Amino acid sequence: MRKKTIPILILAALSAMAISGCKKREPVDLSSLHTTEAVETESMKETSPVKQTDAPSEAVSQAPSDSAALKTELKTEQIGSSSVQYPQISGMKDSSRQEEANAILKNNALAVAKAFPDQTFSVRATVEAVNLKRVTVSYRGSAASGSGGEERFFYTNTLDLDTMENLGLSDFTDAYTVAGYIVSGDYKLSDAAGNEEGIRSELNASDRTVEYYYNKLKAADFSAGGEGWPEIFSYEKQGVVYVSLPVSQAAGGYVLIHYSPDNK
């Protein structure tokens, strides 16, 4: 009986070892759960920066949102048989300042009547640029001349919406630099109605020195404060400065030259 008991005990021991061996495999399953948790943690790490950028993105988008809120609408004023188109802005937070800005824009547009008191003319406006800081408008017109033809003319108005002051050439670039630029002949023409060779011949005549143009450029735009109608107007758009220069009616009445101060 004792001999039979020993094998039975051995078999029981082996069975226990087998069972314990099976239990040792359980950590493999647990490790798979650990891996899943790691993946979830890694996923959270990847998504967390998105939450951190929410606030800055709102701050960045605030300015375009405000700019988009500032709108312009073109209106037309009849002065006898003449007509003048001009812009009015809307969307400013301060309604009183908006009213002041619109009054300035309108008055400057209608000031053209002083230049052609006894003539019939028509003016169309183009809003070149508008943002929360300034409004830039260009005006192209034609007036009936004494010979029965038409006289082309051009003027501009850039209004600073913070100071409610008219900006001019000195706010965009240096007048003496522009004068030298014109005399050098190294300029580009735009809005030219005449022959380019004839226009350049007028602009670069022997008596058109740097001092000649400098004296005229100092009195450019409404910002110069002169009582008469400015002979030269200018504006800036996307870093490019545009200056209107008078030429004979045969050459088109005026021509725009333009250049980028950063490239000069």
Image (spheres, grey):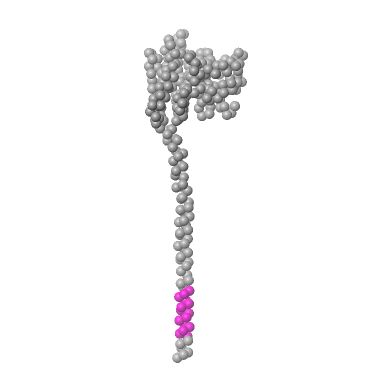
User: What's the residue at 47%, 48% (across, down)?
Assistant: 49
Q: In the rendered image, which quarter contains the C terminus?
A: top right
User: What's the residue at 57%, 18% (across, down)?
Assistant: 214
- The magenta-colored residue range is 7-21
Q: Would residue 148 be found to the left or right of residue 213 on screen? A: left
Q: Would residue 244 be found to the left or right of residue 101 on screen? A: right
Camera-side residue of 139 and 193:
139
Residue 197 visible in rendering: no
Judge whether residue 253 is colored magenta: no
Camera-side residue of 25 and 61:
61
User: What's the residue at 39%, 25% (across, down)?
Assistant: 99
Q: In the rendered image, which quarter contains the N terminus?
A: bottom left
Helix, strand or loop: magenta stretch: helix
Camera-side residue of 19 and 46:
46
User: What's the residue at 54%, 18% (across, down)?
Assistant: 218
Q: Where residue 153 sits in the image (x, y, percent)?
A: 48, 16
Residue 15 visible in rendering: yes
Q: Where residue 243 sits in the image (x, y, percent)?
A: 53, 21
Residue, far bottom: 1
Judge whether residue 19 is colored magenta: yes
Residue 77: quadrant of the picture: top left
Q: Where residue 147 sits in the image (x, y, percent)?
A: 46, 8
Q: Would residue 73 be found to the left or right of residue 153 on screen? A: left
